[in-house]
Image (cartoon, rainbow, N blue to C red):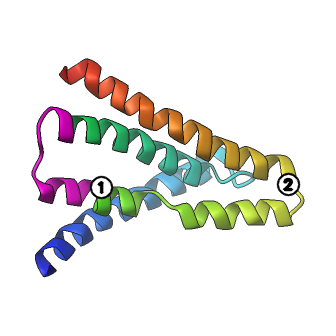
Amino acid sequence: MLYHLTIVMGGAALGGAARYLISTLAMHKLGITFPYGTLIVNLLGCFIIGLFTAVAFDHFNFSPQIRLFVLAGFLGGLTTFSSFCYETIGLFQAGNINFALGNIALNTFIGLIAVRLGTYIARIIFF
């Protein structure tokens, strides 16, 4: 159990650092009127999970430890549902209804497309 926890913690540290860097860069480059950083990390995480699972399960059969590191650790640290919800509520409370609804739509629908796109690209490359 401690071994698996250590694997998850290692991945989460890297994912969390990546989230911080991406979110900070997005804030400086794109501004603060919309939570671009959260959108970017969530969509990137969706794409990576689609790509990784297709490769890990269908082609390379990665070890359970690698899957745990990437899926529960790195992607768990990278993506953030709680920030998405908090920022969306903030947009609603500030009266930015269109931004709030856009945030919901973009994270949800484009997230689903990103998972599918990642899977599709993995299959093109590896199969």
Describe residue 34's horizontal placement relative to residue 68 as left or right.
Answer: right
Q: Residue 104: where, in percent of width, then height?
A: 69, 49
Q: Secondary structure at mark 2?
A: loop
Q: Residue 53: where, in percent of width, then height?
A: 27, 42
Give the magenta range: 57-71
Describe residue 105's horizontal placement relative to residue 94 as left or right.
Answer: left
Q: Residue 49: where, in percent of width, then height?
A: 35, 44
Q: Is residue 37 above or below residue 7?
A: above
Label 1: which residue?
71
**Label whose residue precedes the other's in the sequence (2 or 1):** 1
Q: Is residue 125 above or below residue 7?
A: above
| Residue 14 appears in the figure | no
**Split into 4 quadrants, where in the image is the N terminus?**
bottom left
Q: Residue 122: where, in percent of width, then height?
A: 28, 28
Q: Residue at x 22, y 60 (%)?
A: 68
How crowded is the residue under tag 2: few (<14 C-alpha within 10 Å), some, or many (20+)?
some
Describe residue 30's horizontal placement relative to residue 77 as left or right.
Answer: right
Amino acid type of the residue that numbered disc 2 sits on in the rendered structure: Asn
Q: Quadrant of residue 71?
A: bottom left
Label 2: which residue?
96
Q: Secondary structure at mark 1?
A: helix
- Residue 59, magenta (yes or no): yes
Which secondary structure class fits the magenta region best?
helix
